[in-house]
Amino acid sequence: MATVALDHEFRRMNLADVEQVLVNERRGYTHPWTAGIFRDCIKSGYECWLLHYAGHLVGHGILSMAAGESHLLNVCVHPDYQGNGLGRRLVEHMVDLARAGHARSIFLEVRSSNGVAYGLYESMGFNEIGIRPNYYPSYLGREDARVLAMELIQPGRL
């Protein structure tokens, strides 16, 4: 796998970005989030971030935090930019935000059929802790989600 040069930057998402985010979201997912969901996340104060690479918006991530836990709700990299390390950089950024927010753990769901994403999360230290049956919509009904988690607090630290 080729790794891209570190010519990337992160920027907070704002309401004016939603239409452009939807372009990536619709290219990246069979059942994309709506503009309203993104707007609600921004208005609710979630950590909503954009990934720019070589001057292009290529990805976004949404993280919620509460009561010492964080939940990675959405990670998307435009398909034309997948497979070169940008997804890993985006997830690392979101994990760093969770740590900075003093979250003790981070959770996420991934489609059972998404082996590439599952492999990425596993390589980053996420562990499977359960299954959510019929969690995701699919063309043929519903699909299970694998629930993954990673502890963020190092032993001996509170």
Image: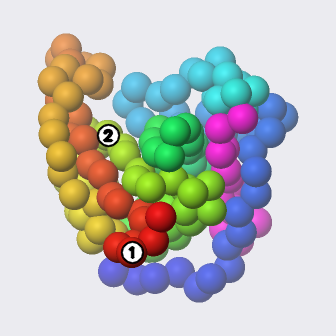
Q: Measuring 65% from the left and 38% from the top, which residue is drawn there? A: 46
| Figure check: 93 above or below 110 | below
Q: Measuring 29% from the left and 20% from the top, which residue is drawn there? A: 137
Q: Which residues are magenta?
A: 45-59
| Residue located farthest toward the top when viewing the structure as drawn | 141
Q: What residue sits right under mark 1 in the picture?
A: 156
Left or right: where 30 falls relative to 12: left
| Residue located farthest toward the right when viewing the structure as drawn | 16
Q: Position of residue 148 (x, y in %)?
A: 27, 49
Type of amino acid under label 1: Gly
Q: Measuring 66% from the left and 44% from the top, which residue is drawn there? A: 48
Mark 1 surroundings: few (<14), some (14-19) or many (≥20) residues within 10 A: few
120 or 69, nearer to the observer: 69
Q: What residue sits right under mark 2 in the picture?
A: 109
Say whether marks 2 and 1 touch (CB < 8 Å): no
Mark 2 surroundings: few (<14), some (14-19) or many (≥20) residues within 10 A: many
| Figure check: 7 above or below 58 | below
Type of amino acid under label 2: Glu
Prevalent SS, magenta region: strand
Q: Position of residue 89 (x, y in %)?
A: 52, 69
Instruction: Please report whichever mark, 2 or 1, sits nearer to the chain's N-terminal start.
Output: 2
Left or right: where 28 falls relative to 25: left
6 or 147, nearer to the observer: 147
Q: Position of residue 103 (x, y in %)?
A: 51, 53
| Figure check: 77 above or below 37 | below
Q: Is residue 90 magenta?
A: no
Q: Measuring 68% from the left and 79% from the top, which residue is drawn there? A: 7
**Residue 13 picture quarter:** top right
Badge 2 marks a residue whose secondary structure is strand
The quadrant of the rendering that contains the N terminus is bottom left
Count of numbered circles on the image = 2
Left or right: where 104 falls relative to 45: left
